[in-house]
Amino acid sequence: MLESLKRLFSRQGNDRDLSEVEAWAKRRGHGFKRVRNEDGFVIDGLLEGKPWRIEWGASQRAYIEGHELRLRMELDLPGEAQMLVLSRALMDSLERKTFEEFTDNVQTQIGTKTPEEMRWLVMFPKVDLGNLRTLRNRFGAVASMPATGLSWLEGPLANMLENAAGEWLHDDQPFLLMTLRGRAYLRMQLDSPDPKAVAAALALFETGVTQAIRASGGPVDRGADSTQSGRSTAWQSFPPEEPPRR
């Protein structure tokens, strides 16, 4: 019975029509691979010669139901450039959850298995969005250095976030954009990988990357350590035993 169910779900994942998003990726010169035996895909591309990756598949976060879209890019930003902007509804939800988990029973430490986005809500000060009136109603932000976080958001990124909130990013749709250990990440709930939604998320992500480089003073030279061995919990790729397929 169990094996029959596994085969059923495997067929469902493989039978999803991804031709539109594949065609979109290939028209723009990006690499596209479908994940073997999974309802998901990987797209690889470049921004100013640096590679980025898009993954769509089953959610890796408890606060996102169903499927999610994930974007990642290595930037070699200064280590202190740790910034997070997220949808207001998600911020409120994670703050409540964090409070319940780590303040009940006078608990004072946050486990390392807890996602950074939850830990940062406790560890880092909030970015003052008082002058960004439209943005503050739909998003919240924290940063290790609030002034740098505000500089990151002001201008093009704030405009992109406001446009997203007015056009394709719904109030109750979990969304976050962050910089961590020199990398940039975007994570959002996306039940169906419509090419327009993927393209919009990528455009927002690329703006976030460009503004992060500007706000933090540019990339740093890490020399032999530029690969930054080890994988942050902010990103978990598809399992190596089930590699993407063409």
Image (cartoon, grey):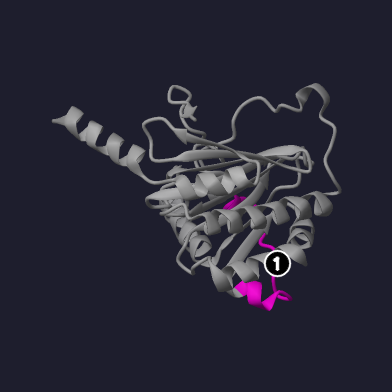
The quadrant holding residue 75 is top right
Q: In the rendered image, which quarter contains the N terminus?
A: top left
Q: Is residue 65 magenta?
A: no
Residue linked to disc 1:
158
x then y, percent, for residue 121: 58, 55
**Residue nearer the viewer, 229 or 104:** 229
x then y, percent, for residue 176: 57, 55
Left-right relation of 194 to 162: left
**Residue nearer the viewer, 68 or 236:** 68
x then y, percent, for residue 67: 41, 49
x then y, percent, for residue 98: 48, 53
The quadrant holding residue 9 is top left
Q: Amino acid at mark 1?
A: Ala
Say if 96 sits above or below 216 in the image.
below
Q: Is residue 131 magenta?
A: yes
Q: Residue at x 78, y 38 (%)?
A: 49
Disc 1 is placed on an element classified as: helix
Q: Residue at x 76, y 24 (%)?
A: 225
Query: In this rendering, does residue 173 appear at all?
Result: yes
Q: Residue at x 64, y 61 (%)?
A: 141
Say if 232 sits above or below 172 in the image.
above
Q: Around disc 1, counting alpha carbons within 10 Å, would you say few (fewer than 14), some (14 to 19), or many (20 or more)?
A: many
Query: In this rendering, does residue 119 appear at all?
Result: no
Say if 114 sits above or below 92 in the image.
above
Q: Which residues are magenta?
A: 120-136
